[in-house]
Amino acid sequence: MNHHQSTAIIIGAGIAGIASAIRLAVQGFAVKVFEKNSYAGGKINSFEKEGYCFDGGPSLFTQPQLIEELFALAGEPIQHYFNYKPVPIACTYFYEDGVVIKGYTNADKLAEELYNKVGEDKTAVKRYLQRSKQLYETTGSIFLNYSLHKMSTLWKAPVAKALMNTKPVHLFASLNAFNQYSFKQAHTIQLFNRYATYNGSNPYQAPGMLSVIPHLEYNEGVFYPKGGMISIANALYRLAVKKGVQFYFNMPVEQIIHKANKVTGVMANNEKYLADIVVSNMDVYFTYKRLLRNEQKAAHILRQERSSSAFIFYWGINKTFPQLGLHNIFFSKNYKEEFDHIFKLKQLYNDPTVYINITSKCEPDLQAPPDKENWFVMVNAPANVGQYESAMQQQLKKHILSKLSSLLQTAIEPLIEVEATLNPVMIEEHTASYMGALYGTSSNSRMAAFLRHPNFSNQLKGLYFVGGSVHPGGGIPLCLRSAKIMSEMVKNDKRGWKYAH
C-alpha cells in the first residue's frame, strides 16, 4: 500500500473555494488554491475611500451556523477569528405611496407591523412563515444539502417525505401567484415577491419553492459580521492557512489537465501542478470553455438563462438618516414591469427598486466618518449582452437620485462626497462571472434546481465543482453548502479509489 498524502487543487479563492479547501484539509488532503486575483474572497471584497469603508459585493449575512460548522470541523475557536451579532430588523421597506414597513426578524412582530401599516391579516403572515419553515426543513434541506444528481444520495435523502410536503403550488405556480394566494394586500405581496431576487430570479416566473427564503430572515434571523462582510472572507482564509492550505495569488489557472478520463492536475504560469482531485470554484461556463476547452459543454450550459446582474453605486453621504437601517429597500411602483425589463427586454428600468446597505448603522465610527454614512446602493440589472453604454450609468443614477430624494424628502445628490461604481461589465471582468450574472443561472424555470450543473463531472473522474454557478445556487449560504456537498462526495469517491488502485 502506498501511503502518499492525497492532493487537491482548488481553482479560485471565492467563498466556496476557501470552504472547500478547509473541508478537504480536514479530510487529510494537501490542498493548493490558485487564484487569479491578489486576494481571497471572490465577490466578497472591500475598499476604503476618504474614510468611508465599503463592502464591494454581498451585503446580507444569514445562517452564521454554516460558518460556525467550519470552525467546529477544523477544531478552531471561532471567536478568535470572527464575531457577529443579530440585527432586529431584517430590512426597512419604502413604498412609492409613502408607506414604510419594518421587516422585523420575528414572526409576531412582523405580522403586527403588516397589520398596522397595511391591514394585512396577521394569521396569514404567521401561516406563511410557518409554511416557509416547513418547506425549508423538508424539501429545502434536500435541495440544499444533497446532490440532486446522484441516485445514491437521493436514496439516502428523505425524498418521498419531502415531496409529499411539497404542494403543487410550490412547484408549478410562480412565486407571485403563490404570494397572491397567500396575502390580501399588494404591499405584502410585493415584499414577499422580492425574495426571488435573492438568487437573481423573476418572481413572476420563478417557482413558489422560493417562498422558503423568507424563513431564513424572519424565523432564523439576519446578522451583522463585525468589520463588515469582508470579515467572513478574512476569517475563512485565516482558518484555511491555519489548516495548512497553500494559496497562490495572481496565479490564474490556464488549463485543467487530464488523461484517460481522469484529471491529473492543472497548468498555471506555464507549469504543471499535479493533484489527485481538482475542484473548480470558477464560473462553470468558463471552466468548460477556457480550462477544459470543451465548447460543446460550455454551449450546453448557456441554454439556461443567466441570473440578473447589478449596478452598484458606493456613496459617501455627508449626513445621517435616522429613518434608515442596515438594509433598506425602495420599491418600484410597477414591480412586474421592472422584471419584464430585466429579463425579457434586457434593459434597465426607469423606476428601479433600489437597495441601500449602510454598515455605519452597526459600526458608526469604523465604517464612515462621524455624522456621515456609507451607502452601498444597488439595483438589479440584466446580465450583460453587450447592451451597456456609458450614458446608461448616468441615466440610472438620475433615476435613483430622484426616487430616493422624493421618498426621503431630502435632496441626495448634494450630500454625495465620495463615489465609486460597479456594473455588470466590470463584474464579469473582475470575477469571471459569465455576462456578469451574479448567481450563475436564474431560477426562472420550474426545473432550474435540477438543471443547475452538479458538483461533480460525469466525464472526468476527480473533477468537482463548487460556487454560485453550480448546485445548489448563488449567495454565501449556498456557496458554503456546495463545498459541503462536494467534500462528502470526495469522501465517498475516495473509498472507491482504494479498490481501484
Image (cartoon, rainbow, N blue to C red):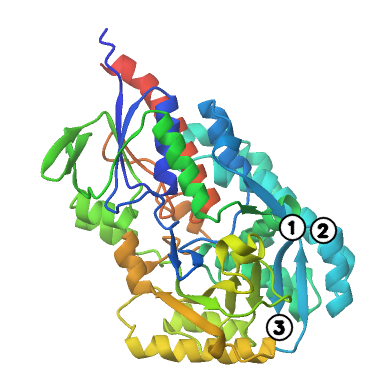
Whether residue 150 is visible, yes or no, is no
Percent of width and height locating residue 304: 39, 64
Residue at left offset 48%, top offset 52%:
450
Distance from the alpha carbon under mark 2 to that under mark 3: 21 Å
In the image, which disc is placed on residue 218? 1
Residue bearing mark 3: 95
Mark 2: few/some/many CA within 10 Å (<14, 14-19, 20+): many
In the image, which disc is placed on residue 23? none
Distance from the alpha carbon under mark 2 to that under mark 1: 6 Å
Distance from the alpha carbon under mark 3 to that under mark 1: 20 Å
> Which of the two residues, 307 or 8, is positioned nearer the viewer here?
8
Residue at left offset 56%, top offset 45%:
144
Q: Are marks 2 and 1 in contact (CB under 8 Å)?
A: yes
Ranked by sequence position, the earlier of labels 3 and 1 is: 3
243, above or below 314, in the image:
above
User: The residue tagged with tag 1: helix, strand or loop?
Assistant: helix
Is 325 left or right of 229, judged from the image as shown?
right
